[in-house]
Every structure is written in C-alpha cells, then in structure tokens.
Amino acid sequence: VRRALTPSPRLALIAFAVIGGAAVAFQVAAPFTTGATSGRLAAAAWIAAATASLATGLVVTLLTSDRGLYGAWSLWCAAAFVWMTGAVIHFAVPHSSTGDLVADVLWCAFPVLAIASIARDTTKGSLSLGLFLVDALPLVLFLTLALRLDEPGELAAPLGIDTEYLAFAILYLLLALVGLQMLWLEKSKRGTPNIWGFGMAQPVLAAAALLWPEHWHENAGPAPTTFRDALWTIGFLLAAWTGVARARRANDAPELLPLDDSLRRIVPPAAGTIGIAILALSVPQRYEAIPLLFVGISVGCLAARALVVQRAGSRVQARLRENERKFRTLVDNIPGAVYRCAFDPDWTIEYVSDDIEAITGYPASGFLGSRETTWRTIEHPDDADAFAEHIRACLGARKPFDYVYRIVRAEGEIRWVQDRGQAVYAPNGRVRWIDGILLDVTDHRRAEEHAARQSRLLELLQTVAVAANEARRNEDALRVSLEAICAHTRWPVGHVLLREGRDGPLVSAGIWHLDEPDRYEAFRAASEELSFQDDDTLPGDVLASGEPDWIASVEDHLDAVRPVIALEAGLRSALAFPVLAGSEVAAVLEFWAAEPGAPSPETLEFMANIGKVLGRVFERTRAERFLAEQNESLRELDRLKDEFVSLVSHELRTPLTSIRGYLELALEDVGTLTSDQREYLAVVQRNSERLLRLVGDLLFVAQVDAGRLQIDHEPADLAAIARESVQGAEPVAAGRGVGLSIEAGPAPLDGDAARLAQLVDNLVSNAIKFTEPGGTVTVRVRAEADAAVLEVSDSGIGIPAEEQEQLFERFFRSSNARRAAIQGTGLGLVIVRAIADAHGGAVSMESAEHVGTTFRVELPARLPQTDVESAPMREVA
Amino acid sequence: MTATESQARILVADDDEDILNLVALTLEREGYAVLRARDGAEAVDVALAALPDLLVLDVMMPKQDGFAVIRALRDSRATETTPILLLTASVQEQHRERGLEAGANAFVRKPFSPRELLGEIRRLLDGIRSVPAT
C-alpha cells in the first residue's frame, strides 16, 4: 500500500451509504404512498445515490495504488450507478416505452459490469477476459432480445411462454451458471470465501426466481408464501455472507488486522447487508429488489473495506515511519555508504548516505542531480571499465555484484572500495535502479598486498635458505640466491663480489645474472677488472660499513667509473648488501636496475636477512674446513700415539731385557756372590719385574684405547683358568698370611685363555693385596644360564661406597689403598673390565668397608651350537 | 748338550750393545759359536758371507730392520732355509705377523729370560719347525 485512503474518499463513502440508504427507503416506501411527490423524491434520491456511487468508485480507483484489488470495486460502483440510473429513468418517465427501453438497457448493463467485477475479483486483480466473455456476452444478447420483445405473446406465443419470463429465466440461469463457476474456481484455485458465498447465492436466488415467475410480472402483486420467502431469505443471506467475506478479504494481509479486532470490523457491514436483504424481501416487485440487494452488498462491503483499509493504512503509515527510522539508524550504522543509482554510464546517483563524504571526500549532496561529480568521474580510470563490465555481467545474470576497485578522492588520494549491490528490476525486466553499499577497504587491501608481498619475500628467503643448506660450496649458494633474487625483483643485473683473502679488497666472483648479456657486457668487463675497497664505490662502502647501501640515481655518481658505464647500458640505480660471516663481510651482492629509486626499508631489511642466511653458508664451510683440518690433526695425533706406544714398548722393554737377563745370569753364578749381594740383586729383580708389569699394563691399556685388543675365541674352561691362577698366587698369599681357596665347577666358554688368566690374576692379586694377614680370599667359578661366572671375594678393607663408581677409572686408587700404602697403578681393574668387555661380559662389585669386597665377572658361555651338541649327552646321562 | 749344537754358529744381530752381549754371552756359555752384527745391513752381509746355522734378529735396527734382513736372506738360496728367530720389544701383533710373513721361524718378545731364549734356539736347531708360542 503506497498511499492510504485520504479523508475525502472516506467522506465519499459515507455520503454514498447515506444517500444510497435514503434511495432504498424511498423505493421501499413508494408502493404504499401515492402522488408524484414521493415518486420525484425517490427519483432524486436514486440520482444522488447513483452519483455518489460513481464518485466513490472513481475516487477509490484513482486514489489507491492497488488497482488490481480496487478495480473490482470500481466496476461494482459503476454497476450500481448504471442500475440506479436505469431506476431513475424508470420512475421519472413511467409507462413511456422509450424510458422503459433506456432503463432496460441500463439494467442490462448492470449484470455485465457486475460479472466483470466478479471475474476480476475472482482472478485476483486482473480481469479474466475468458470468464467475462463466457458469462456476459450471451447475457447481453438474451436480455436485449427480452427487452425487444417486451409485449407478451409476440415471440413466446407459439411456445406458450411469457417472453419476459423467458428473458429473465435466462438471466437467472446464467447467474446460477456464474455461481457454479465460482464454486468450481474456488475448488480448483483456492479462491477466497467471498466467492464461495456468492457462488452459493446465485443458484439459490435463481431457483427462487424461476419457481415463482409471477414475481417478475409487474402486475403480479405480492403473494408471499412461507416457503418461497424462506428460499429468498437463504439466497439473500448467502449473498450477505459474501459481503461479510468480502469485508474480511480486506484483511488478506493478516498483520494489518489483529484477529480480535476482525469481528468488530465485520459485524457492521454484515448487519447492514442483512438489513438491506430483509427490506428487499418486503418490496412487492421483487425483481427490482435484486439490484437493490447488489447495491446494498456493494455499499456495505465498500464501506467496511474502506474502514479497514484506512485503519490499516494509518497503521501502515506508523509502521512506515518506524521502518524509515529503523532504516535511517541502520544506514547510519552501516560502515560504508548506502546508495541507489541509475543503471547508466555515469551511475547517476539517486540517493546516497552521508558516509560517502568520508569515503570520497565529496559530500553526498554533491552527487545528487549533479553532472559534474558523478560516480564515473571519481572511479580510477584504470578500473572503471572493468567495473562497469562486471556490473553488466552480474545484472545480466540477475545476480548481485561485489567488486573491489580504486577511486580517486577529492584531494587526489587513491583509495580502494568494495562495492556490493543488486539491481531492482521493472516487470518488463529492465533495470529500474541499483541499490548497493560502498565500503572503504583500502586498509584491508593494503594489508593484503603487504601480506602477499611478505609471502613472496618469504618464499624467496626460503629458496635462498634451501640453496644455502644444500650448497656444498659458497659459490653455489651465492649463484642460486642471486638468480632467485633477480627472478623475484626483476632486476636485470646481479653480481657477486668476494673478498680477496680474509681482509683483502672485494673482487668479482665471476657470478653474474645478466638479463641481456650483450647489453651489459661493458659493465661486466669493467666490474671484473676492478677491485673495491674504498668507500667511494658501492661495494667498497658496503665492505666498510657492513650495511646495505644503494645508489638511488647513478646520475648523481657520474664522477665514478662504473655509474657512467651503467648509465650507458641503461642502468640507473643500484643496491648492494653484504654477506656477513660472523661480523666480517665475506662477500657482497650488488644489483643494478633500470629505474632510479631508493629501495624500501622492507627490501633493505629483507636483503640484510638474505645476507645473514648466506653468511651462515660461509660460516658453515669455514667450520667444515676447520673440522677437516682438525680431523687431519687428530689422525696425526693418533699416529703419534701409536708411535709413542711402540717407542715405549721398545725403549722401556729393551733396557728391562738387559736388566733382567744379566740379573738372571748373575744369580745363576752360585758361589761368587755373597748372601748380602744376592739379597740386593733379588730386590733389583723384584722391582724390575714390577716395572715390567707396569709397562705391560700401560701398553695393554694403550692397546685397548687404540681398539687393538684382540681376543681369540677358543673353547676354554674358566674353572681351569681360575685354578691355575690361584695356584700361581698361592706363594704370595701364603707370604702375606692370607687364606686363599677356590670353589670351581666347570664353566665352559669361548674366549681367550691368556687374557682370561690375566683377568683372574688381576682380581686375585688385588684381593690378596687388600686383605690383612689372617683374612681370606675365596675364588668361586660356576656355570649359570648361558654364562660363566667368576667371583673373587675377600675379607679385606673394602671400598668406600662413594668411591665404588670410580673404581674402574684408570689410575684411580681408593683412599683405603692409599692410606694402607698398598702398591698399585690403578690399572688392574681397568684391564679386568677391558677383557670382560672384549668377551661381551660384565664386571660388578659389592663392597663394605672392613667387611670385604666381592668382584663378580659374568661372561657369556659357549656359542649356541655347543649347547645343541651337549643336549643329547645329558639325555643319555 | 751335543757336539753339533756346540759347534753350531749363530749370528746375533741387535743394535743394542747390551742385548747383543747378553744374547751372545748366553749362547757362548752354552757352547755356541756366536757371530755379531750391529745393524741390519751388517747382519745380511755377515749372514751371506758366513752362512750361520741360525740367526737371532732384532726387529728394530738401523739401516735395515729385521724384516728387511729376513727378506734379503730368504731371497738368497744359501740362506733360504736358515732358521731365524726374531726378537722384538713391541707388543704390537703386526710385528709378529709381519715377521712370520717375511719368513721368520720363531718369535721371542722382549724382555725375555735367557733360559726361555735358549729353549727356543734349541728347538729350532733340533729341526723342529716350532710354531711360535708367544
């Protein structure tokens, strides 16, 4: 509803109701009064009612936008006007054949209009021509026929039927047909309740009329019967119901009329309609009551409808105002400008919210009706066409559009805007206008661009990092990085300079990226001939400062050699950055570009990062070189150690050989030596043996360190080895007053008997050494699951718990041993462990001070196949 | 002690004068005739000239080491089968292996006792191709 009914049509409606009611009253009263006065009054009342009805119809039709709905009412009004005009003529010129003819024609026009109205109403707004033709045209034909044959008998005489009755019969049959049609439409098209009621009323009224034809004869006079009137009443009530339903129809939009109000609104028109129906029944000439009925229904319905619509209208207006307010608030709160523009090349703005000023710098009013500042003029020239193309494509596909483009602000700044909107279309498919919203997305866009740039830079950095990781040589990493940087930046010339020596000048590494080698040949040749150290050259300055440096425009440096050559080759700016290994400049990468300009801080920072990554390659290769050198010197040390070992073996053992040999010779000479001399020589011999043992132990450990300890794996019996060792140690034990015993069961294993003997000797001699006279040393050997186990227990001084961990470290001597001044090198247990390890075994110990110590050696037993062989033997046994 | 043994001539080569004398003394006391050499080259010269019945060679000698001496003697038909006993102060296994490879018949590690050395020499002279024990 665009505009609610104004007070004037409301007044027209009331006037119509009052005048129409008066006309009906006069008409009803006419048969009971006499004289021309009442007839003239009735005629005047009818004329007024007719005029009012026409006026109402016109006003309603013209002033409401919903022509579809009100069109039906306009037709009703016209029908009422036509009928009443007919009545006026009928009353004003009684018994004149011309008057009758005109009245009859008008009366015939009434049902035509009425049916047209119904047809229009039924099809919800638009007139159904088919329905109209089917119903109305035959009706007109037959009514015309009936009126032309007004005198009885002329046509119907041969048929024996009253002609007028025949005509009206056809009329009423048609009305019944219309009614049935309504019901059918109702069923098939879910018509509205009013049609249902109307459809029922028509056949009933038709039946009533056809059954009592005398009603249609002017002179029939009243002959009421109960049944007949009941039928009329039912028909009228059904028709009245149509009026009620029509009133309800006004409430098609439920939100316009709450349910509890609806009854209040329906009762008055319904009561009015029913009252008119009752009045109509009391009219003697009832065929005249039919149009009265229609008029009454029309008046009642129209009034009711007008009331409802108006009430709803004020409600709608309030709602509209509320919506408008909401819309304003919304628009004001939307981040961006809301607009409506025409679909034309300039995007002529019809409406735009005030925010447009924040976005464009132009006030909203500047766009409205102005030809100077159109949207087209502020679009960035590079984007305007693409944007227009995008909109055309979207609108063509009836889709909303969403596009980001640049605009030029009033003061010239370029901003990015996002423009989203859609078209509103006319019924014929043309674009009426475009509604949309504009957002300033410049910050977002810049952030995106920044992120994209960052990600490209990261990619580049990654390329460089990967190259740096994979490169075997510094030059490889530099070459790959140079290419990657040039590919990324599109700089036409890239060049690597390396340090000559550790602190020499920079010279070309011969690593180049040249987009056009021929063009830059002179520049390349000049660069390769020079060396750079002074800070008046670009690489020299980078070398001196350790920081990136650049030439924004070579034209400012034409006093130097290379800028001149560069300019000749079309190179106008340069950037160089150092590759820092630690804190020193190891290399410099320089790039030359065709456009003048200083690099962005971002670029500089980035190049510094690349320099650091490449610097790590230099550090790494340097470290690798250092490592290789160190490896070499370690190998040399190893060789020297071997030499030392063999020197020691030779140089210590050779004199010992002489000492021991001559001693032996001397001691063999029985009789020539005094007993004192013999005793002295025995001391010498004992100590030479001790020295020999020490040398042997040292050499053994050296062998173990060098990984040269070789172990034979021959079948052996640990018990036998232990017994032999104990036997050998018995004199020493006896000398010290230590009880030495052995409990040995067979303990076969694969091993080196000589080494194992050395192991047992060491443990046994240790045990004896650390046991006070009167103490005991017990050696136990037994076979356990897959192992040969040796245990050497003593009742000696024990080892403090905190020292037990260090016991197997070379040259370690327990505090107890040192206190008791027990001789030893601290190598015995090292040798024990080394031999046990070489056999794949393990050494463990338990000790308590002043109680004793037990060493336990566990060695893997024989190889598995030996076990398999022994299995059947056990079975036999 | 048999006459043949006593007459046997043994070349002892060692650059260490004391060891040389010790070995020589031990052997002479047992009745062997002893020839002396103080370096490898001399040992080869003397051996080829005098064709001793047995050689006691130190491994580490100036000019030519024991291995070189053995190889030189094994190359000559006259000394091809002469028993050779190697003396070494090294504990390194490869000395023994290299010696046996070169063609030594026995191997005695310093320090040795004179009795032990005599035992080995007797075994060699008796024609027993002993498997070196140490």
Image (spheres, rainbow, N blue to C red):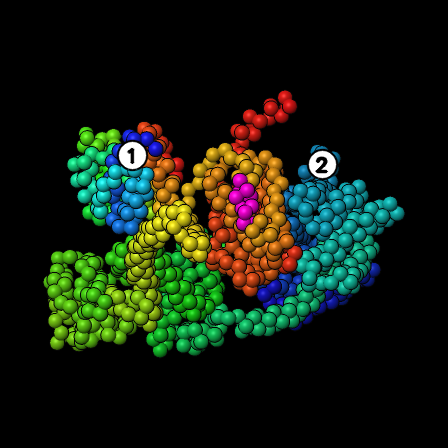
Find the magenta span and give its range: A724-733
- Quadrant in which the C terminus of chain A is drawn: top right
Horizontal and vertical percent for residue A47? 68, 64
**What chain is tagged by disc 1?**
B
Q: Is residue A604 visible?
A: no
Question: What mark, if any, has residue A157 been given in the picture?
Answer: 2
* Labels 1 and 2 share a subunit: no
**Mark 1 highlights which residue?**
B6
Indicate left or right for A153 with A414 as reference: right
- Badge 1 crowding class, 10 Å Cα cut-off, few under 14, some 14 to 19, many 20 or more, is some
**What chain is tagged by disc 2?**
A
- Quadrant in which the N terminus of chain A is drawn: bottom right
Q: Residue at x 65, y 64 (%)?
A: A56
Q: Amino acid at mark 2?
A: Ala
Indicate left or right for A639 with A37 as reference: left
Dividing the picture into quadrants, the one containing residue A211 is: top right
Q: Residue at x 60, y 67 (%)?
A: A3
Horizontal and vertical percent for residue A144? 63, 45
